Amino acid sequence: MMASRNQNRAPRSPSSKRGDGDGVPLDKRRRVGAGVGKTAGSERKPFGSVNKKLEAAASSADASSKDASESSCIEFTKEEVEALVNEKAKMKRFDLKGNLEATTELNSRLKLCLKWCQKREEGHVEEESKLRNDLESYQKRCEDTEVEMRRVEEVSRTTIVELTKENASLKEKLSKEESEKLAAVESYRKEHEARIALETEKASLSKELEEANKKASLDAVTNNNLKAYNESLQQYSAKLHSDLVTTRNLLQRVEQEKAAVVENLSTVRGHKQSLQEQLAISRASQDEAVNMKHSLVTEVKCLRGDLQQVRDDRDRQLAQVQDLNAELLKYQENTGKSQAELDVLISKAQLLEETCSSHRKQISLLEQKLTAANEKSKTLDMTAAEARTGFEEQRRIVSELQERLADAEQQLLEGEKLRKKLHNTILELKGNIRVFCRVRPSLPDDARADTQVVTYPSSLESLGRGIDVMQNGQKYPFTFDKVFSHDASQQDVFVEISQLVQSALDGYKVCIFAYGQTGSGKTYTMMGRPEAPELKGLIPRSLEQIFQASQVLMSQGWKYKMQASMLEIYNETIRDLLSPNRSSSCESSNAPGKQYNIKHDANGNTHVTDLTVVDVSSIAEISSLLRQAAQSRSVGKTQMNEQSSRSHFVFTLRIYGVNEGTEQQLQGVLNLIDLAGSERLSRSGATGDRLKETQAINKSLSCLADVIFALGKKEDHVPFRNSKLTYLLQPCLGGDSKTLMFVNVSPDPSSVGESLCSLKFAARVNACEIGVPRRQMNLRPAIAAVDSRLSYG
């Protein structure tokens, strides 16, 4: 291709050779039309016809893009996407129209594939949100069910304790009543026997009285004695009467106790009703139902034991009644008036017997209720089993939803990776300069505002790629290849450029430079703080990746040698930051005997004469060189920044690789540039040397803008030579390099004007097409020159 380009060039005049004494610049390729017009005017017509053909091809490409947008319903498989990404347009040597049509067709298919990937990504996001909502609802239901089961369990435990206490008290009362009943029955039996004995004694006394009457007539003395004896009998009868009254009072107390027992029985019935209600409530418990069943069986056993104890108490009370009956028999031996009292006792015994029968009925009712409770317990067991089955089903559904959610997230990640790959492929085919935007966090010294100056759109299309700036109530939207918010870490930023850095090892020329106003965070993005691992900038992280990847590729037969150089452009003067004597280097840079000149060779490689180049083989050596360069770099204090960079810093790493197995050779270049910040004199307050530095910085950045505008308009002449900075960046901006620009923005409301200028400039840079990157492989003459200085092995 280089030979064909050289053959198509018009011969240069001697004056043009004298003007280009430093070498043939790459911008000559863009000025072919102008050169031909000057030397041979008759040859402008063929180039005009070629331009018309290119315009016709562009119009056909627009028509094909419209057709592609109408056919957005096309579906792609994973194999088709991979084949489309790996597909390369077939380029013919002199068929410009055919090459343009092939490239346009490939771009249209890639755009269709990208739109399809975006639609799939939207569908995955919607499905993921739906699955998350379902998962949250099922989890909430499970939590509510567990809380309700715990509450029912606590209520059931409390109810069981109360039931146990009331059952014990009821057993005690029942045992007392049965003992009183047995005592009354025994008393009735003894009184009946005493009555029969009294009747027999009465008959014997009447016989003795008749015999005594017969004898009364015989002896008056005996009569008097009988009278005296009769009086004593009357006194004894009065004493018996008083004892009978005492016995009646005792019987009245017994009746009162019986009434109390009846009242207690009614109270027990009320308690029994409440116990039934509480038992019905306790059936709602799932796990405690089985325990309650066992406890009820145990309680029945206890009731039977208590019943036996009641019977024993009844026997003791009967023994007491027997004692009372024995005393009563003693009273009735001398009188027959105790018959009525005995009848009363019999009636009381009958009442007690009726009470005992009612108690038996109550016991039978309790046993029936216990049976019903057992049946309900079985029903509760079945209900609990059904609840467990439902719970297991819900748990299975939740696990399935979690698996589906994980699959959806995995597909979303794969789709995002594929989208990035397609996007990078389209950018490489278009030859655009990639632009990333980064917003630094707010600082305590920043001005305060009612509303945020910098915001980020939340739409799916602009998420992670859009940024909005507010000025005087008007919103200015911008879209770049990637936008990093103020909370993005250094690692997040480096992940997005890691593949671009890897391209330098693959034989490409890579250029990454940071642009923005003073104090917007350019130096922090590029250098960071190397002493803190998590705060390292892009330059230290990129070099670490280069060395780590080169170690991995050694297993595949690759061997690498690397050379590093660092310079700064200060007041349009190049300074060597790695010179052994920094002060003498600065003096020599201005001396007529030693000049740092920029040279571009035929392969698009850039060299600076007399610049210190150091062979490096480890990250430790690079770190040492970076510290040396940081100490030598020109910095100063302004009203906008305490430590403002007053020069453009350029780090260059040349990579030479050889594969001894395949005899493949490559040469890559990694340029990492930290530009000085643009600033207004009215805000910076620069005077003296700082004023000269500010003017030189603004002039070089203005020349960079002129170059970008000329590239955007596709002008024949691009003013690369107007500044040392643009002339040094000529291969990156107008050649076959992979170029990335970081535009750094400050969220300070007082800097919104400078932020808008930086973003508008970045948008123009993103629209520039500089050509498709070309891999530098099998460069035998260049590698041979390197081999003369370096040894592999």
Image: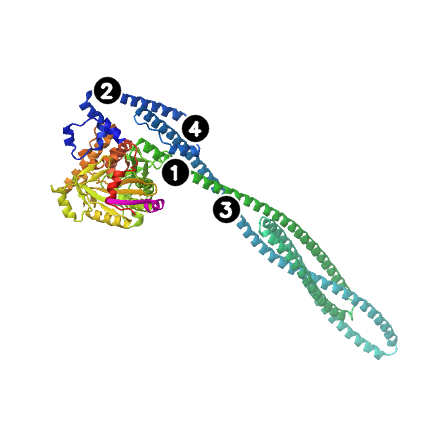
Nearest-to-viewer mark from 2 and 1:
2
Q: Earlier in the sequence, mark 4 or mark 2?
A: 2
**Left or right position of 649 against 245:** left
What is the CA distance from the residue labelled 4 to the residue labelled 3?
Answer: 45 Å
* Numbered tag placed on residue 74 in the rendering: 4
| Label 2 close to label 1 by CB (< 8 Å) | no
What is the CA distance from the residue labelled 2 to the residue labelled 1?
Answer: 47 Å
User: Is 226 in front, or is 208?
Assistant: 208
Q: Amino acid at mark 2?
A: Lys
Circle 4 crowding by C-alpha within 10 Å: few under 14, some 14–19, many from 20: few
The way the protein has been coloured in the rendering is: rainbow
Q: Amino acid at mark 3?
A: Glu
Q: Which residue is mark 1?
A: 417
Q: Amino acid at mark 1?
A: Lys
Magenta residues (range): 550-564
User: At 73% from the left edge and 59% from the top edge, which residue is drawn?
Assistant: 353
What is the CA distance from the residue labelled 1 to the residue labelled 4?
Answer: 21 Å
* Numbered tag placed on residue 601 in the rendering: none
- Secondary structure at badge 4 equals loop
Nearest-to-viewer mark from 2 and 3:
2
Q: Position of residue 547 (x, y in %)?
A: 31, 46
User: Is 603 in front, or is 672?
Assistant: 603
- Secondary structure at badge 2 equals helix
- Res. 472 in view: no
Q: Amino acid at mark 4?
A: Ile
Q: Quadrant of residue 316?
A: bottom right
Nearest-to-viewer mark from 4 and 2:
2
Q: Which residue is mark 2?
A: 45
